[in-house]
Image (cartoon, grey):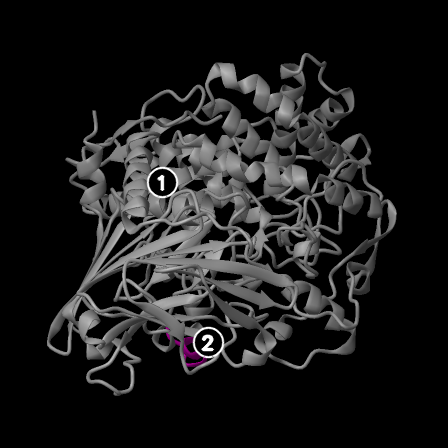
């Protein structure tokens, strides 16, 4: 039996110097508070991503974000999705796709008239920064507050993964400051204990600052528009107050409870200061989408105890993988990535909405989530024995089912077509790439199948019944999307494969998507059988006659049309056997040759963080564990994991990339637990004596 506390705690994060790229987050999947070296959000400018991006360096926001905090800019022109449509000629006749979007809109470039609607629709709604809670540090009464962490001496910060507790200490003005930070596991609430003589002397105080929303690509806040929002302080008695926030049509409230001292408006708009008169000050900040909601008083101890209990339960339930005893020098680093990725995906990817690629740390694409990435963020929760953390986000698909049906009808298809880049309302964002992607379509089927496997037998019928309509509508679209020619079924143009740099108007039969189409329909057929229904004859006809992936020189190409294979971006053709289990249209020996071809000649600087788990899964399924480990731990910049577990991709534009963390966990679980019919334990790890892998609680893959 694995000593889970030792396993987890040996990877607790410790930081001993400020770095704008290193932030630590406490949260619960639907709410998160990201702190700087002080354990609070003290040095806002130091972590500003916009400045860092302009200077081509790495920095990460320290924002407060949630799954319910969204905002839309005013829309005086009344833009709607129809304003961003282009008509494509297809085998079914003219079909409209919302593709009128120019990427320059995200970088402040001039927007042509034809793209104005797409620019607004792509940027709205955006996820908002609910507010910054930091320290105001002054070296003397009346001195200017510190704005950069160089003023601190001997900073030390530790995130205890076992309890979800962040402890930060440093010296300032000759005095030690100790800050303990925890997040409520069930509510949008963060709590602080600040211990220092500087609090009693007035040289340290708590400052709350509230920004306006931003419609930039990665910005979470606009500090230059104080007249566009309001922040109203309402006392609630001794040691308690509420701040009401209004940003256009968005409103929310912040309930504050503190142990002693006084809260007052500061000199700047939307800024409030909490001062104390004792050496210890405790503060609890609770955020609510309902500005009239009053949960009552909550103490720091209440939040800390709840967090410690939840995280102990998290680590002692589900699965664990331990590499103790391995002599391969990469084993310790892989174990570190595995443990930190479990923490990060729980904090940022286990909520009621599919996660965004930068989680609840920073915005990308305005904070919207990408449904083709949902699998990479969250599939591992089921395979690691924590299916409830995946299931939280699956009900959202039911909430937008009517919208997905309307999209399919507009394009003359049956069933429901799932969008790509969306906010909580499910309205897709215009894009000349996203509007034409299809590989997100089978994702709900695969995620539900993993949930079914991870659930106890007596809980499975309820899951099948609850999602039966979603499964059926998803498969109906897939069956109507194919084009029959001479008895074979094809994925026709216009289609954009997961490797997003082909001409959608002429591309057909992408290899990964063909295999995924067969597997998705097979899941839907199995779901029918679980409901006591016969297999659908039309779906079966498509499965039995689906076009085989295109081959050249003994290996698969990415698509069946010229140029057949580009050697940059995602090597997603490998997903056809690896992410997708073995099926009748993909040959294992040809896929092994394809893997070797990719590994031998690919532009790795253009690959993405989840591509390395893809290769590891493919190598595992084709019986090459040596290549699985090499691929998963490939030494290349976009496969690097920082000391806090983040996987940066494009500097400050994407300073972290959570699909890589989730993909890593998916790959490791396949490499350790295997799949139905696998002939050995740990099929993804070499049997050369270098790897000692103990695992427990993992769910076997299909």
What residue do we see at 69% from left, 68% from top?
A: 120
Residue 646: percent from left, percent from top: 35, 56
Circle 1 sits on which residue?
628
Residue 665: percent from left, percent from top: 38, 40
Which of labels 1 and 2 is toward the front? 2
Query: Image quarter for residue 624?
Result: top left
Q: What range of the chain is rendered magenta?
A: 50-58
The residue positioned farthest toward the top in the image shown: 532
- Side (left or right) of 642 relative to 502: left
- Of helix, strand and loop, which one carries label 2? helix
Q: Is 620 in front, or is 115?
A: 115
What residue do we see at 66% from left, 58% from top?
A: 433
Q: Is 539 in front, or is 311?
A: 311
Q: Earlier in the sequence, mark 1 or mark 2?
A: 2
What residue do we see at 38% from left, 32% from top?
A: 384
Residue 67, compared with residue 694, is above or below; it is: below
Circle 2 sits on which residue?
50
Residue 161, compared with residue 97, is above or below; it is: above
Q: Classify 10 Å Cα crowding around label 1: few (below 14), some (14-19), many (20 and above).
A: many
Q: Is 240 in front, or is 582?
A: 240
The residue positioned farthest toward the right in the image shown: 93
């Amino acid at each position: 039996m694995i000593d889970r506390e030792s396993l987890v705690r040996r990877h607790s994060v410790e930081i001993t110097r400020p770095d704008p790229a290193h932030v630590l987050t406490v949260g619960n999947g639907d709410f998160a508070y990201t702190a700087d070296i002080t354990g609070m959000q003290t040095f806002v400018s130091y972590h500003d991503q916009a400045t860092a991006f302009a200077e081509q360096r790495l920095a990460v926001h320290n924002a407060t974000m949630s799954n319910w905090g969204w905002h839309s800019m005013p829309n005086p022109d009344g833009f709607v999705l129809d304003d961003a449509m282009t008509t494509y000629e297809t085998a079914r006749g003219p079909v409209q796709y919302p593709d009128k979007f120019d990427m320059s809109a995200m970088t402040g470039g001039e927007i042509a008239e034809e793209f104005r609607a797409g620019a607004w629709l792509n940027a709205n709604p955006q996820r908002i920064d609910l507010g910054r809670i930091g320290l105001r540090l002054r070296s003397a009464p009346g001195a200017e507050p510190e704005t950069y962490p160089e003023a601190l001496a001997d900073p030390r910060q530790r995130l205890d993964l076992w309890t979800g507790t962040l402890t930060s200490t440093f010296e300032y003005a000759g005095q030690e400051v100790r800050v303990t930070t925890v997040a409520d596991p069930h509510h949008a609430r963060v709590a602080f204990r600040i211990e220092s003589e500087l609090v009693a002397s007035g040289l340290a105080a708590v400052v709350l600052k509230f920004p306006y929303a931003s419609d930039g690509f990665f910005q979470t806040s606009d500090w230059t528009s104080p007249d566009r929002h309001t922040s109203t302080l309402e006392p609630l008695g001794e040691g308690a107050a509420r701040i009401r926030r209004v940003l256009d049509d968005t409103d929310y409230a912040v309930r504050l409870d503190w142990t002693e001292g006084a809260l007052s408006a500061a000199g700047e708009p939307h800024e409030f200061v909490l001062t104390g008169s004792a050496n210890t000050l405790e503060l609890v900040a609770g955020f609510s989408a309902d500005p009239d909601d009053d949960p009552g008083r909550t103490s720091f101890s209440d939040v800390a105890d709840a967090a410690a209990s939840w995280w102990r339960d998290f680590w002692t339930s589900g699965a664990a993988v331990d590499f103790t005893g391995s002599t391969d020098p990469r084993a310790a680093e892989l174990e570190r990535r595995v443990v930190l990725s479990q923490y990060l995906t729980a904090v940022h990817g286990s909520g009621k909405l599919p996660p965004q690629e930068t989680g609840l740390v920073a915005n990308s694409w305005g904070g919207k989530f990408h449904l083709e990435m949902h699998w990479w963020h969250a599939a591992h929760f089921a395979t690691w024995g924590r299916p409830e953390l995946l299931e939280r986000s699956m009900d959202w698909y039911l909430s937008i089912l009517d919208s997905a049906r309307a999209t399919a009808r507009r394009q003359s298809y049956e069933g429901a077509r799932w969008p790509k880049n969306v906010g909580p309302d499910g309205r897709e964002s215009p894009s000349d790439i996203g509007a034409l992607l299809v590989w997100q379509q089978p994702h709900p089927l695969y995620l539900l199948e993993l949930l079914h496997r991870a659930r106890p037998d007596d809980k499975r019928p309820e899951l099948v019944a609850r999602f039966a309509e979603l499964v059926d509508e998803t498969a109906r679209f897939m069956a109507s999307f194919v084009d029959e020619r001479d008895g074979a079924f094809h994925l026709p143009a216009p289609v954009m494969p997961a490797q997003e740099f082909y001409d959608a108007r002429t591309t057909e039969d992408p290899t990964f998507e063909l295999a995924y189409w067969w597997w998705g329909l097979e899941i839907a057929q199995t779901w029918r059988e679980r409901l006591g229904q016969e297999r659908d004859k039309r779906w079966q006809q498509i499965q039995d006659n689906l076009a085989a992936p295109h081959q050249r020189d003994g290996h698969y190409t990415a698509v069946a049309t010229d140029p057949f294979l580009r050697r940059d971006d995602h090597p997603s053709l490998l997903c056809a056997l690896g992410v997708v289990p073995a099926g009748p249209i993909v040959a294992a020996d040809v896929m092994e040759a394809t893997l070797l071809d990719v590994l031998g000649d690919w532009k790795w600087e253009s690959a993405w963080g989840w591509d390395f788990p893809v290769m590891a899964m493919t190598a595992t399924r084709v019986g090459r564990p040596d290549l699985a480990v090499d691929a998963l731990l490939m030494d290349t910049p976009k496969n690097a994991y920082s000391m806090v577990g983040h996987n940066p991709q494009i500097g400050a534009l994407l300073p972290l990339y959570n699909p890589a963390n989730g993909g890593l966990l998916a790959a490791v679980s396949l490499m350790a637990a295997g799949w139905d019919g696998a002939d050995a334990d740990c099929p993804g790890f070499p049997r050369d004596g270098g790897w000692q892998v103990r695992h427990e609680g993992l769910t076997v893959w299909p």
